[in-house]
Image: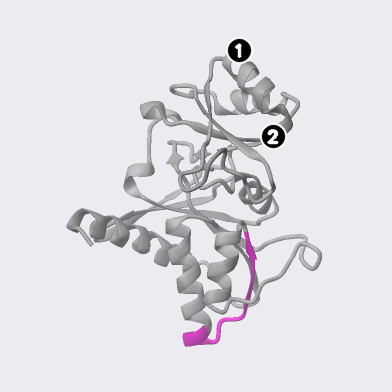
Amino acid sequence: MKPEQERLEKAKRNAALEAVKHVKTNFVVGLGSGSTAAYAIEEIGNKIKREGLRVLGVPTSHQAFTLAVEHEIPITTFEKHHQIDLTIDGADQIDDELNLIKGMGGALTREKIVASVSKSLVIVAEESKKVKILGQNNHPLPIEVLPFAAPILMHKISGIGGKPVLREGTKKVGPVITDNGNFIIDASFGSIPQPAELELKLKGITGVVETGLFIEMADVVYLGKPDSTERIERKK
């Protein structure tokens, strides 16, 4: 592993290790998706083996499910638990108000459902994910859409100022298919100073399943660095 990549992975792991300290025995825990959340899943599994921690996990994606099984975390479902004590998940961008852009891994809808029924949402990320305003550096906003409606939605997203691109697979021909059988449109809006307003506009378009804007959902963010972690709490 190259030195820069090694530093990045240390930062991710540091953030994840701090977040897992929130997990208590008998918790139902939402298991986020992505490379940083993967470290949290691994550490929860370690605590089960090392400390006898008793938890149940609700995975947000097939990736999270596979990792949970690998690390021997018992799985539960919404049929048995309608509320989650704590969710640990990653983010692609985090603004000063702890609003988020998520979904570059394609699991935004399930991630948002799990977060919405969690008593606490703890976000783990390496420090470069923190920005002043969402959309900074022309970062795209993932939008999950019904495949049937995708051509119409591309047009409508353009009409409200976005530059939409249908996400294509890297090791398959054609669009990326989400765990829900939908497509993802990555739309660049430039800086998003009013994310709640954009969220309302997008969710008002028929055929949009969910957006990667997570507004006032995160309670605590851990920003990992190679040798430390910064904790930020949302002002309430």
What residue span does the magenta drawing correspond to? 49-59
Answer left or right for 90 relative to 197. left
Answer left or right for 31 relative to 91. right
- Residue 208 appears in the picture as rendered: no
- Residue 221 appears in the picture as rendered: yes
SS category of the residue bearing label 2: helix
SS category of the residue bearing label 1: helix
Residue sitting nearer the eye, 132 or 209? 209
- Label 2 sits on residue: 147
Q: Residue 42 at what x, y percent from top left?
A: 46, 71
**What's the CA distance linking mark 2 and mark 1?**
19 Å
Q: Are marks 2 and 1 in contact (CB under 8 Å)?
A: no
**Mark identifier at residue 81:** none
Residue sitting nearer the eye, 14 or 79? 79
Give, as a three-letter code, the residue at label 2: Pro
Quick one: label 2 or label 1, which is nearer the N terminus? 2
Q: Residue 146 at what x, y percent from top left?
A: 71, 35
- Quadrant location, the C terminus: top right
- Label 1 sits on residue: 159
Residue at x 44% of width, y 23% of height: 191
Q: Tell me if residue 121 comes above or below residue 215 in the rendering.
A: below
Give, as a three-letter code, the residue at label 1: Gly
Mark 2 vs mark 1: in front: 2
> Residue 54 magenta-drawn?
yes
Residue lying farthest front?
173
Residue at x 76% of width, y 62% of height: 78
Residue lying farthest right?
79
Q: Residue 33 at what x, y percent from top left?
A: 53, 56
> Residue 192 magenta-drawn?
no
Residue lying farthest top?
159
Specify how the rendered protein is coloured. Answer: one colour
Residue at x 23% of width, y 62% of height: 1
